[in-house]
Image: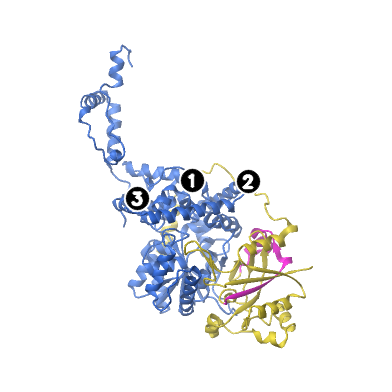
Chain colours: A yellow, B blue
Amino acid sequence: MSDARNKILSRLRGQQPVINETERYTALKTELPPASNLIEHFRSRMASVRAEVHLVSRDQWPTKASALLKEKGLTKVLYAPETELGKTLHNSCSDDELSRLVSRTNSVAEWKEELFFDVDAAITSTKAGIAETGSLIVWPTAEEPRTWSLVPPVHIAILDAENLYATFSEAMQAGGWHKLMPTNLLLISGPSKSADIEQTLAYGVHGPTELVVLLITET
Amino acid sequence: MQSSGDFHARVRTAVADSNLRVSFRKAMDGFMSKRLDAFPDAEALERLRLRGAEIRVNALSKLPELLERLERQCQANDIQVHWAETVEDGNNIILDIMRQHDARLLIKGKSMVSEEMALNHFLEQQGIECLESDLGEFILQLAGEPPSHIVMPAIHKTGKDIARLFKEKFPDIPYSEDVDTLTRSARRILRRRFYEAKVGLSGVNFAVAETGTLCLVENEGNGRMCTTAPQVHIAVTGIEKVVEKLSDVPPLLSLLTRSATGQAITTYFNMISSPRKPGEKDGPEEVHLVLLDNGRSHIYEDDQLINTLRCIRCGACMNHCPVYARIGGHAYGTTIPGPIGSILEPQKLGLDNIGELPTASTLCGACAEVCPVRIPIPQLLNRLRYERVRNDGTALTRGQGSSRESNIWKAWSLAHRQPTIYRIASLLVTRLRALTPNRLGAWTEARKAPRPASRSLHELAKTNGFDNE
């Protein structure tokens, strides 16, 4: 198909387009949320798309996480024991709580059926958050693969408020993403939903029905 | 291929369907008010639109370089890049990939380019099953209908229609009109297929040249499923979807989702830059990018019409179009309906095939006012109306043709250059005014036929002694 490539490119090169655009863009004033207000903004945005946000302190989050597992009756919950987050969770769990947690470190293909039909939830870390839109920035890794935040009916995400940015642009710049994009990078803003039937919102179409965010704050 | 005659027939059917008009009116009103709520600050919106236009104009003005850069970056990231000049090329590239993997099922995320390619039909003729996984597209596939809106494909279907359709296609599932129940049924059916499929297909909202990243905007998670669960991911896109930098993405994303559905952001924004890397536990082992031209490089050759290619497919122009709201998406008979479809499709399919579309507009200008990348749609509609009736063989647009209108204007121009012809013509018109027919096609459907005056202004002036006009 290199023939097609050359034909397309040479047609495009046949003429240098002159596009008349009379008005020019001038720098965007920052419109968005003042630094003091990031957490509140993030919370209200998340709430508006039916995500559950819990503010927790740094040492309390594992207790809150395991309480939520019990409350929601989740008995098979994926977590990554080799990460810092996984270790912290593991160390603070009682035996009953531990029995709800499962870890899978082999290729997903080897346990795809279990993942697709049997797992209740996954707990994952997040890279950062965006206050303006109420979004989690999820950067899947070998320990926390891409399907974890997608396939189980419940996704529990841990976000450190220190990593909350005002806007998407800001997060992108601060992370220097343009230099090295990962295999997959995601913004997640709420549970899976659709309005395709009569413009009525329905949740949990293909992804999680519930998104739970534990937002770690200093206070 | 569609023709203009069909267009008029489809419009008549659509306008006569009061259910359709009610459901479109309601849906469009909803879209308009949600968009308005999403942009509370008019000045900020105008600045953002300028930024959006600037990003798209910049990308188009460097298109060949950016496509090469995108190709280089994707290849450096292990994404395989394919170029397709025509729809047939594109379909065959995908067929080859399916065959290499001995795959009998292609699970699809929403992609208007695959609609443009009529990919499902093509693959099914080769014995390969295509399954739409976007809820709206899934419903339409069951019903055997094309989408009627680019963002909300099944907008013309009522809950009852869908409940009956599910009962007919899946008799084991109890009948229900409840939206949540219907959604859960679809989830269960499609979950199994996601689990089985070896190859998944998606469209692309933005392709970033700087990093070789494919961006996908969606709410349901089916786009993520199609691009994550199968061993192979094929992305198809038009060549115009490229942007230069990663930093171009946030403003465009914000314009896209707010203009389309009034959402600050969609549930998922999925940025894919490579297949599975060593050590990673999931994701496709191969990622293919198919770059489709299909007439776009031809549109690119005209300095005015090139602006058609700025489009980011938000659908705001159709949501705000008084004609679209009354006739719905199917009447257009093209992949992309509404104002943007009326300028894009005739350039692709030829004015001789579907040249009526640019006339399906009141030129009220609402489309241009809401367009997030400031495409001057009314000017382009006018330009294509002109291209359709002029017959000097200079236009680049396909299907520019001879027509009654162009001959009339030729005769008009001749008469105004030749005083003798002009005098004879005005004499004939005034003296034979009684012969004016009472029926003049569409004009007299709602009006009386115009009758020329008995004496021309020239004659009256002469009689009254005005000298030399």
Q: Single out the mark in the foreground, 2 or 1.
A: 1
Q: Position of residue A208 (x, y in %)?
A: 57, 73
Residue B235 in view: no
Mark 2 lies on a secondary structure that is: loop
Looking at the rendered image, the disc whose residue lies closer to the viewer, 3 or 1, is: 1
State whether discs 3 and 1 lie on one chain: yes
Mark number, residue A20: none
Contact, CB < 8 Å: mark 3 with mark 1?
no
- Nearest the viewer among B361 and B301 is B361
Residue drawn at x 65%, y 75% as measured from the top left: A124
Answer whether residue A171 is magenta in the image. Answer: yes
Question: What's the chain of the residue with tag 1?
Answer: B
User: In the rendered structure, which amino acid carries the disc numbered 2?
Assistant: Thr
Query: Which of the chains bears the disc numbered 2?
Result: A
Of the 4 image quadrants, the one containing the N terminus of chain B is: bottom left
Q: Amino acid at mark 3?
A: Arg
> Which stretch did the figure color magenta?
A152-181
Where is mark 2, residue-wise?
A: A26
Tag 3 residue: B398
Front residue of this view, candidates B234 and B155: B155
- Tell me, yes or no, whether the highlighted magenta stretch contains residue B243: no
Looking at the image, the residue that sits furthest to the top is: B465
- Give how far across and how far down residue B370 sits, in percent: 52, 48
- Mark linked to residue B366: 1
